[in-house]
Image: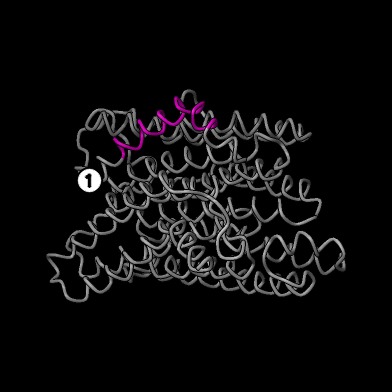
Amino acid sequence: MNAGLDMATDLGRLLPEIILACASVVGLLLGSFLPRHRQWVVRVLAVVACVASLVWTVTGGTGMVFADTYAVDTATNTTRIVVCVSVPLVLAMARIGGHARETEFVVLLLLAALGAVVLAGANDLLLLAAAYLLASVPLYALTGFAKDGPGTEASLKFYLLGALLGTTMLFGVMLLAGAGRGSDYPTLHHMLPGAPAAAVAVGAVAVLGGLVFKAGAVPGHFWVPDVTEGTHPAVGATVTTIPKIGAVVAIHRFVTVLPLNWPLLIAVLAAATMTLGNLAAFFQRDVRRLLAYSTISQVGYLLMAVAAARASLALPSLLLYLAAYAVTNLGAFAVVCALPRARTLDDYAGLRGHRPWLAVSLAVCLLGLVGTPPTGVFAGKLTIFTATFDAGLGWLVVVAAVNTVASLFYYLRWLVPALRTRDEFPRPDRAASLTAYLAAPASVLVGLLAGPILALTGPAG
């Protein structure tokens, strides 16, 4: 009887993940029978599933499930919320209505979102490896969804690097599970201090390599600009947002469990990631590649919170930054989706005169990515900088501050042409424009509500 009650409790806590999984299966079956002009039903199903997952996340309980292999805590719940908000925004900007494979797009997006959530909650190495695959394979297919030359090339690069680092991750899982005589994090935390130090170090770095690939951080960042440029901008928005949320939370959970001295290694990765991302973005004229390198630099700031994991403010600031980054980055990509023919910075000339509200949305999102008050990224950066300083990594705060000021340059390189006048300007997509109009104020709203958000995430941090 007790075993049955425990199983029911565990399944109840996992209901948001179950809803997303069931929606993927049902959506795939529906799409197999629905005519082309009625596949919009699958999109509606996906949105309903995200709303239901949000509601259950807010009202459901927390705790460890299935023998401590999965954690339903503040970090997992925040990931659920951010991912379930991001999916409808991506669907709105994707412009796939009436596409012959509309159902495939929606189902792959739901599966990738589910993988990101499971990444965040995984408390076991085997589950972490399975989540890595679930968060990766659907995105390989989405990247080449258009079946054109650039998309196919981007998908191949994405897959090859993912396969390489995924195999490396599995090797690390094997080493850690063997050295720790188990795969769940509580067992590893107890057993690894007495295990051979070399095996533990090599295994931990190998696992970290796979997670770094998913996050798009150095040295696993090479795929980000090529994939973002080669695929549909809505897919670019997906791969630079949704998997990063789960991956960064997974890195935080992983490094706080293993008995290793992580702060310096993560701090060096954070500094290298933000610096390389910003330096590479300086020379970009293609807006998609610029946003790609921008997202790499943003991961560097997020990793600061991981390096400062021992500080009490580290996890709350990380979760706040993730929420702010998601809506802000999606808002910037929504503008790109609204103007699919505008590929370079100069193509945005005349935006302010012909589409002033779209120009305002772009300005809010780009300045938000810099960290301009009162946006959510500003609040996230401020709290992460504070946590990093409290953790004794003052040098990293200085590096991050310099990078923040430097990043203003390439964002302004995009905004300045948008302020110029031009006689003609292409008509933007209505749904993508509406997405930008929603995401831009949401970015500011997260900043204004930073205090309550930190209060909600703080106790569990």
Q: Give the percent coordinates (x, y) of residue 122.
A: 58, 60
Nearest the viewer among 59 and 244 is 59
Nearest the viewer among 370 and 176 is 176
Q: Let me know if residue 286 appears in the view.
A: no
Rendered image coloring scheme: one colour
Q: Is residue 265 left or right of residue 279?
A: right
Identify residue for label 1: 431
Marker count (numbered): 1
- The picture quadrant where one finds residue 182 is bottom right
- Mark 1 nearby-residue class (10 Å; few <14, some 14–19, many ≥20): some
Measuring 61% from the left and 53% from the top, which residue is drawn there?
Answer: 217
Q: Give the percent coordinates (x, y) of residue 420.
A: 32, 28
- The picture quadrant where one finds residue 319 is top right
Magenta segment's dominant SS is helix
Q: Is residue 29 above or below residue 234?
A: below
Q: Amino acid at mark 1?
A: Ala
- The picture quadrant where one finds residue 178 is bottom right
| Residue 49 counted in the magenta span | no
Nearest the viewer among 14 and 238 is 14
Measuring 27% from the left and 49% from the top, which residue is drawn there?
Answer: 92
Q: Is residue 252 left or right of residue 415?
A: right
Q: Give the percent coordinates (x, y) of residue 351.
A: 28, 33
**Quadrant of image for the C terminus:** top right
Q: Is residue 259 above or below residue 102?
A: above
Q: Give the percent coordinates (x, y) of residue 3.
A: 53, 68
Measuring 48% from the left and 31% from the top, which residue is drawn there?
Answer: 376
Q: Is residue 10 left or right of residue 403?
A: left
- Range of magenta residues: 436-455
